[in-house]
């Protein structure tokens, strides 16, 4: 098993949320901005629900644990949106 690193991701802050691209498998993780203040207080600025699109040859995260890739994508996306909102 391989472990994802921060350097494996490209982060794009969009008007509607954040897209985290996991470069080793070209998987796209899209997190949407939350608008409801109660949801923001509970989850932070982004929804923890994610839309995943795998674009690599394997159709998944290959030799990387999918839960680790998704967790890191969310952490990096949340950090990027907080930085963008300053």
Image (cartoon, rainbow, N blue to C red):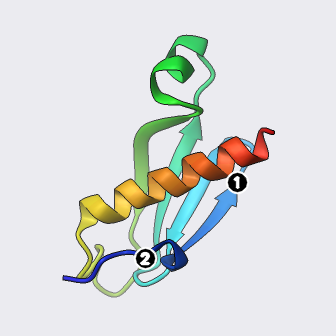
Answer with left or right where residue 33 lies relative to residue 68.
right
* Residue at position x 77%, y 39% in the image: 85
Q: Which quadrant of the figure has residue 15?
A: top right
Taking the view exactly as shown, the residue that stands out farthest to the top is 38
Residue 33, compared with residue 71, is above or below; it is above
Asked if the residues shown at circle 1 and circle 2 are in contact, with their CB atoms under 8 angstroms apart, the answer is: no
Earlier sequence position, callout 1 versus callout 2? 1
Query: What mark, if any, has residue 83 been given in the picture?
Result: none
The x and y percentages for residue 8 are 49, 78
Answer with left or right where residue 54 lies relative to residue 11.
left
Taking the view exactly as shown, the residue that stands out farthest to the left is 1
* Residue at position x 46%, y 28% in the image: 43
Q: Mark 2 points at which residue?
A: 55
Alpha carbons under labels 1 and 2: distance apart: 20 Å
Residue 39, compared with residue 26, is above or below; it is above
Residue 10, compared with residue 20, is above or below; it is below
Taking the view exactly as shown, the residue that stands out farthest to the right is 86
Q: Quadrant of the C terminus?
A: top right
Q: Name the residue under label 1.
A: 13
Answer with left or right where residue 55 lies relative to residue 41.
left
Q: Which quadrant of the figure has residue 37?
A: top right
């Amino acid at each position: 098993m391989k472990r994802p690193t921060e350097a494996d991701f490209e982060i794009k802050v969009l008007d509607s949320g954040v897209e985290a691209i996991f470069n080793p498998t070209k998987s796209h993780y899209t997190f949407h901005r939350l608008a409801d203040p109660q949801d923001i207080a509970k989850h932070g600025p982004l929804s923890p629900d994610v839309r995943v699109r795998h674009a690599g040859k394997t159709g998944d995260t290959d030799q990387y644990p999918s839960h680790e890739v998704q967790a890191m994508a969310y952490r990096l996306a949340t950090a990027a949106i907080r930085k963008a909102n300053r």
